[in-house]
Structure formats: C-alpha cells, structure tokens
Amino acid sequence: MAKITYVEHGGREHRVEVPPGLSVMRGAVDNNIPGIDADCGGECACATCHVYVDETWLDRTGVPESGSQEASMLSFAALARPNSRLSCQIAVSDALDGLVVRLPEGQH
C-alpha cells in the first residue's frame, strides 16, 4: 500500500493508505477526503478531482501529455498550474508511497 498525503487548501493534512491499482482520486473518495468532488467518478470528464502534485513527485507521476484528454480537462480547472493533475489519472503504485498532493481552493 502507498501512503498518500492529501493537503486541503487550508493546510489540513490527511494521510491515508491507498492500494496499488487504484487512482489517487479513488483513494480520496474512499477515505472521505474533503475537496475532491470527483463528479464524473473518475472518467476524466469533469476536472473536479484537480490536485497539485508536490514538485518533488512530478518525475514519478508525470504531467499530462499535450493534447491529451487530461490536458483538455485541466484547461477548464480553476487555478491550474504547471504541476496540476487530475487525480483520477494518477495510478497508485508502490513507487508513489509518500506522495503529497495539494487541493485547490475549489473544484468549480
């Protein structure tokens, strides 16, 4: 299991264990982490699971490919940054043990 830390916009941290194979979004939803709305249920169709990946983890999570559906959805996300990702598109693996993601002020 990978331990992932979700940091709310106000600074409150939630550290949870997420099984490999699930998405970072699913880990948040299954553990009732506030700030991840996931309106589309993880289908990369709404951008309400937007997170900021801690810069030190970008080499492991990657960034959305230019022209991808994720990149397109992020163009609709409030306050997108270069380290923005849709958490439904980040597959959890043992390599992500310790991952830190920060939540934007809002998802809409």
Image (spheres, helix red, strand yellow):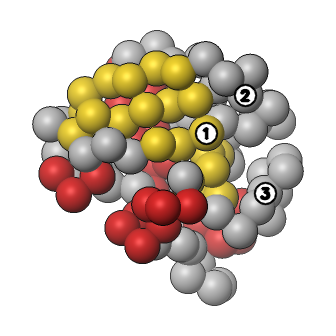
Does residue 37 sit above or below 61 in this rendering? above
The mark found on residue 102 in the picture is 1
Left or right of 69 on screen, residue 100: left
Q: Check disc 1: other Cα within 10 Å, few if <14, some if 14-19, many if 20+.
A: many
Q: Secondary structure at mark 3?
A: loop
Kindly identify the amino acid type of the residue bearing the numbered disc 1: Arg
Does residue 90 sit above or below 37 in this rendering? below
Q: Secondary structure at mark 2?
A: loop
Q: Check disc 2: other Cα within 10 Å, few if <14, some if 14-19, many if 20+.
A: some
The mark found on residue 9 in the picture is 2
Question: Who comes first in sequence, dot 3 or dot 1?
Answer: 3
Left or right of 14 on screen, residue 103: right
Q: Are marks 1 and 2 in contact (CB under 8 Å)?
A: yes
Q: At which x and y percent is residue 17?
A: 25, 28
Q: At which x and y percent is residue 76?
A: 81, 57
Q: Which residue lies under the disc numbered 3?
A: 80
Nearer the observer, disc 2 or disc 3? Answer: 2
What's the residue at 66%, 71% (across, down)?
A: 71
Kindly identify the amino acid type of the residue bearing the numbered disc 2: His
